[in-house]
Amino acid sequence: MTFELTRLRFHLRAAGSLFFPPGKAGNVLRGAFGMKLRETADAPDYHRIFEPRTIDGPSGLADPPRPFVFRAAHLNGRTIPPGEAFHFDAHLFDTRAETRPHFVTAFASWGRAELLHVDQHDVAIDLDQPGERATGVRITFVTPTELKPVTRPEFAVLFARLRDRISTLRALYGPGPLDIGFRALGERAAQVRMTRCELSWQETERRSSRTGQTYRIGGFTGFAEYAGELSEFLPYLRAGQWTGVGRQTVWGKGEICFQVCS
């Protein structure tokens, strides 16, 4: 059982001075992509990629997760001078061949930067193969993360959100939901204990240029360490490094990375 995605790395050169506000680089790119996708794609493709709607999805989701996230935390708070090269990544969970050109076409017509080239890397994570034994991990929350209704990322809650996100993405854009014992896996995750937690809350907002509404996009950043029998959870953590976890991942939130500490 695998989780598959495509990473596109966009290399660009700034046409003029280009500022990415602190904590908002991913959202700036998402907004630019949506605006240009509306111009360059037909309506069915635009809605399929940027504004999917379904009443028949997992758990009756009416507002399903988008089939992509942007990764650009390294651009937060930076001003790119005219003529300077920079890059960012897009992770595509709908890996059908006809989806990828829409991203390239949209950013080729952005106007704020010249698209130099795009690198493509196809990823397949075997969720059944831990690969190593682990009795401790440190998880770093790179961008603001929300796991409502909790404020501390206890492992059972973190894993449940991650497992459900992976399963939903597979159900909507891949071969189908995870074929696992959700309850039993969750019970084993509850045996993993948090041994250290150093987090700080980051608060910021975004304003929709389309609706004029303002949204809070805060969350915690920092790291937490966990101890227990973690081997079977490592593949999900690997997938989570690509998918993100928690609320509003499409706005750049919920980016994580991890390392085995045992």
Image (tube, rainbow, N blue to C red):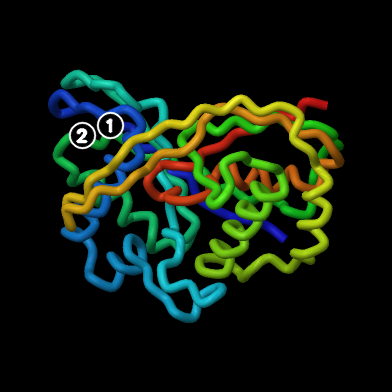
Relative image position of residue 2 (x, y in whole percent): 68, 57
Residue that protrudes farthest toward the bottom in the picture? 56
Q: Residues within 10 Å of mark 2 (few under 14, many from 20)?
A: some
Relative image position of residue 142 (x, y in whole percent): 51, 31
Give the quadrant of residue 134.
top right
- How far apart, in angstroms, are the residues tagged by discs 1 and 2? 5 Å
Give the quadrant of residue 102.
bottom left
Identify the image quadrant of the C terminus.
Answer: top right
Relative image position of residue 144 (x, y in whole percent): 46, 36
Q: Nearer the viewer, residue 18 or 224?
A: 224
Q: Look at label 1 and name its amino acid.
A: Leu
SS class of the residue under badge 2?
Answer: strand
Tag 2 residue:
114
Residue 12, label in figure: 1
Q: What residue is at 78 percent from the left and 50 percent from the top?
A: 189
SS class of the residue under badge 1?
Answer: strand
Relative image position of residue 180 (x, y in whole percent): 76, 65
Q: What residue is at 24 percent from the left and 22 percent from the top?
A: 80
Q: Is residue 221 above or below residue 131?
A: above
Q: Nearer the viewer, residue 158 or 25?
A: 158
Identify the image quadrant of the N terminus.
Answer: bottom right
Query: In this image, 66 relative to 146: left or right?
Result: left
Q: Is residue 227 above or below residue 98?
A: above
Q: What residue is at 44 percent from the left and 42 percent from the top?
A: 253
Q: Look at label 2 and name its amino acid.
A: Glu
Q: Residues within 10 Å of mark 1 (few under 14, many from 20)?
A: many
Q: Are marks 1 and 2 in contact (CB under 8 Å)?
A: yes
Q: Is residue 195 above or below residue 176?
A: above
Query: In this image, 195 relative to 75: left or right?
Result: right
